[in-house]
Image (cartoon, rainbow, N blue to C red):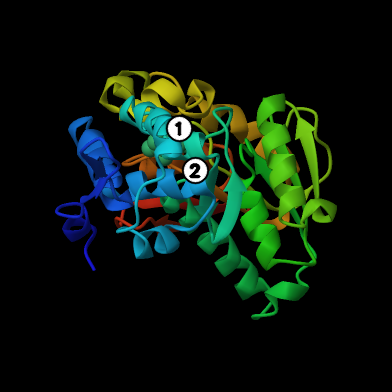
Amino acid sequence: MTIGSDITGNQQTRRNGQGPATVHTIGDVVGKAIQRLGAAGVEQPRMDAWLLLAHLRSVDRATLLAHARDPFDENERLSFQALVDRRAAREPLAHIIGRREFWSLDLQITADVLCPRPDSECLVDAALHEIRQSTKGHQREWNGHILDLGVGSGCLLLALLSELPAAWGVGVDISQQALSVARSNGEMLGLGKQVSWLCCDWGSSLEGRFDLIVSNPPYITDREASDLAPEIRNFEPATALFAGEDGLDAYRALRSDLDRLLASRGRICLEIGHGQAAAVEALFFQAGFRSIRRQQDLAGVDRCLVLTRD
Ligand code: GLN
């Protein structure tokens, strides 16, 4: 069934004693929302319109699609319109519905954290690959310590802990608001006992050594700001996005903490921006690290560096 075929020709008429009145189906109303979002430049207007109504009704999208020919509940019209208005103003869908899936985990999202990107899953892949190798496939028994610097929603750390039940993690962020989102995601996923949360500037107030350090720091250059989609530029936290003139400020700031906090034979998985691999590797070579691997994202772009000191 295509949604497009549902949104036309489904209007029913009824007589209520005052002449015919049009009864709009769910498909009609969502169809109009799709047009509106498309005209506003939203990338996936169809998906988003259905997800907004699914959110409003607290049902899944498939259930709604199965009822596309049912009459639309007129009492919902204003509430649905308000959600569509927000999305048409290019507020991210994750902010409106308050959720986003990452690594098949359902995460709470607010405007205080970066919306997890599917591309960042390659960092989880890269880290798990390292742990599988070091444990000869017994990753569920790996009881190492993981540090996530700039943890945001907690997506990377919680995805890793969900795969590594014997591991323990520390999530650090400079934003208290971000940490409260991460903490609540940890609790919601039943991973609270495996993790501690700490508010500080990168690793500055941390001690000890970690077997795995992951980070998705800001890496967008200041001059790229105007190229970003309005969802990112106008709604996501700038501190999680921008890193100076060459986009490398955060890597420079992280280097000494990583050096101090990495255990021997430890691994670092760092997210990087498009075309930054060689420059970031060079920064870390200067600090005595070596790059083991570059991991590509869904578009085949180098998105993660795996670094070590050994
Ligand atoms: N990958 C994100 C984007 O392109 C940015 C995240 C970041 O700077 N770490 O919007």
The residue at the point 64 percent across, 68 percent down is: 131
Q: Which mark is residue 56?
A: 2
Which percent across, then down, holds residue 206? Answer: 80, 34
Quadrant housing residue 78: top left
Identify which residue is drawn at 35% across, 27% down: 85
Q: Within 8 Å of ligand 1, the CB of disc 1?
A: no
Evaluate whether residue 74 shows in this view: yes
Residue 164 lies in quadrant: bottom right
The residue that label 1 is drawn on is 79
| Mark 2: C-beta under 8 Å from nearest atom of ligand 1 | no
Question: Split into 4 quadrants, where in the image is the C terminus?
Answer: bottom right
| 45 or 108, nearer to the observer | 45
Seen from the viewer's position, the closer of residues 261 and 139 is: 139
Mark 1 Cα-neighbour bin, 10 Å: few <14, some 14–19, many ≥20: few
Sequence-wise, the earlier of marks 2 and 1 is 2
Name the spot of residue 21 as percent of width and height, x first. Answer: 24, 40
Q: Amino acid at mark 1?
A: Ser
- Splitting the image into four quadrants, where does ligand 1 fall? top left
Q: Is residue 149 left or right of residue 284?
A: right
Calculate the distance from the C-alpha at mark 2 to the C-alpha at mark 1.
8 Å
Q: Mark 2: which amino acid?
A: Leu
- Above or below residue 60? Residue 199 is above
Classify residue 42 as left or right of residue 278. left
- Quadrant of the image containing the N terminus: bottom left
Secondary structure category for the residue under label 2: helix
Left or right side of 295 for 164: right
Q: Nearer the viewer, residue 175 or 234?
A: 234
Horizontal and vertical percent position of residue 109: 57, 39
Q: Secondary structure at mark 1?
A: helix
